[in-house]
Each structure stands twice: as structure tokens, then as C-alpha cells.
Amino acid sequence: MGLMAKDLRIATEMGGRLGAPLLMANAARAMMQACANEEGAGANLDAIAQTVEKMAGLCFADHA
């Protein structure tokens, strides 16, 4: 998760320098960074659902 967040940060910074706002990439970067902060930098993409659950106070499914 940490590496994906870093890669998106680099891409969105480059987009900003070039005048392309990359709105969806910024949203994805923010979510991945929140997930990395919550679940750890080594978390996989599935951890995003757990982060959203915690943020929303929901439970999508039982976690094994």
C-alpha cells in the first residue's frame, strides 16, 4: 500500500506541475495513504475495503 501511495503521489505531483489536476488519481492517492496509515505500508489492496468500513462504521463482510 505504501508503494502504491508513493507512486500515485509522484504521478499527481507531476500532473500538478504540468497543469493536469488528475482529480481521480488524487482521490485514489488519498485513500491509499489513509489505508497505509491505518493498516500499515505493507497492506494489500484488499485492505482498502477494511479502511472504508472503519471510516463509515460499516461491515461489508465477515473477515477471516
Image (spheres, grey):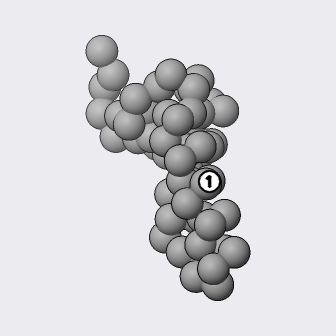
Q: Residue at x 59, y 72 (%)?
A: 15
Q: Which residue is mark 1?
A: 9
Relative to 56, 17 lies left or right: right
- Label 1 Cα crowd, 10 Å radius (few <14 / some 14-19 / many 20+): some
Residue 61 seen by the camera: yes
In the visual, does 11 lie left or right of 64? right
The residue sitting at the bottom extreme is 19
Residue at horizontal 62 percent and vertical 53 percent from the top: 9
From the viewer's perspective, is residue 33 above or below residue 37? below
Is residue 56 visible in the rendered image? The answer is no
Q: Nearer the viewer, residue 28 or 64?
A: 28
Residue occupying the point 30% across, 33% down: 61
Q: How many marks?
A: 1
Q: Position of residue 59 (x, y in %)?
A: 41, 37
Foreground pick, 21 / 51: 21
Q: Position of residue 63 (x, y in %)?
A: 33, 22
Element under disc 1: helix
- Is 42 located above or below residue 21 in the figure? above
Decide which of 9, 60 is in the foreground and name it.
Answer: 9
Residue 8, x across and y down, in percent = 54, 53
Pick whichever, 13 or 35, lies toward us.
Answer: 13
Residue 14, position as x, y percentages in the image: 62, 66
Residue type at mark 1 is Arg
Quadrant where the C terminus is found in the figure: top left
